[in-house]
Amino acid sequence: MVDLPEPSGPACRLCFVCSGNICRSPIAAVVMQRLVDDAGLTDVVQVDSAGTGDWHVGDRADHRAVTALREGGYDGRAHRARVFEPGWLADRDLVLALDRSHLRDLRALARTDAQRDRVRLLRSFDPTARDGAEVADPYFGDARDFAEVLEQVERACRGLLDAIADTQGR
């Protein structure tokens, strides 16, 4: 089991982060929100997402991400991209990086060891993934790449929810 930092308040606040917040992190946020809702944990887990870059701020999720989500039974149409703000490290309990470049960039923003410890690779919660596994960027790929991202994210989010539920005593 992955060791989680202590929640900073009554709810565990999660932020999923990729490059532009139009492919991987919106997929992860939509999947995690559904898992949280289905588990009846909406009162104890809050989910959002952002990008390390600001070039897509305000944009909808990539149409291929929305399609992969729809084909998986999710709805990603409401998403609007935004950029990760450094101050969020102080009020998010976990910041889930989708790849090692995001992990490095986010940890560089941290002001304390506790903030650095809150930044984790999402796939570190996937029980089938090797250490250091990333969610590959599907942006230059096709529908199959987006479907693979969805599968990886679903496994990792299930593992993350299990870890959170364990810390909540559920």
Image: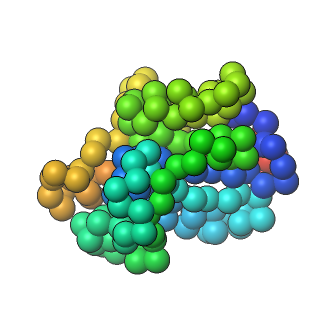
Q: Residue furthest front?
A: 55
Q: Position of residue 45 (x, y in %)?
A: 70, 57
Q: Is residue 41 above or below residue 122?
A: below
- Figure label count: 0
Q: Position of residue 30 (x, y in %)?
A: 49, 65
Q: Is residue 74 visible?
A: no
Q: Is residue 121 above or below residue 165?
A: above
Q: Position of residue 113 (x, y in %)?
A: 69, 22
User: 164 or 107, which lies in front?
Assistant: 107
Residue positioned 33% across, 71% down in the render: 66
Q: Is residue 115 above or below residue 70?
A: above
Residue positioned 42% across, 69% down in the render: 58
Q: How is the image coloured?
A: rainbow
Q: Is residue 61 visible?
A: yes
Q: Position of residue 47 (x, y in %)?
A: 61, 59
User: 154 or 108, which lies in front?
Assistant: 108
In the visual, does 101 lie left or right of 147? right
Q: Residue furthest right?
A: 10
Residue positioned 47% across, 40% down in the render: 97
In the visual, does 76 lie left or right of 166? left
- Give the quadrant of the N terminus: top right
In the visual, does 91 lie left or right of 162? right
In the visual, does 90 lie left or right of 151? right
User: 128 or 52, which lies in front?
Assistant: 52
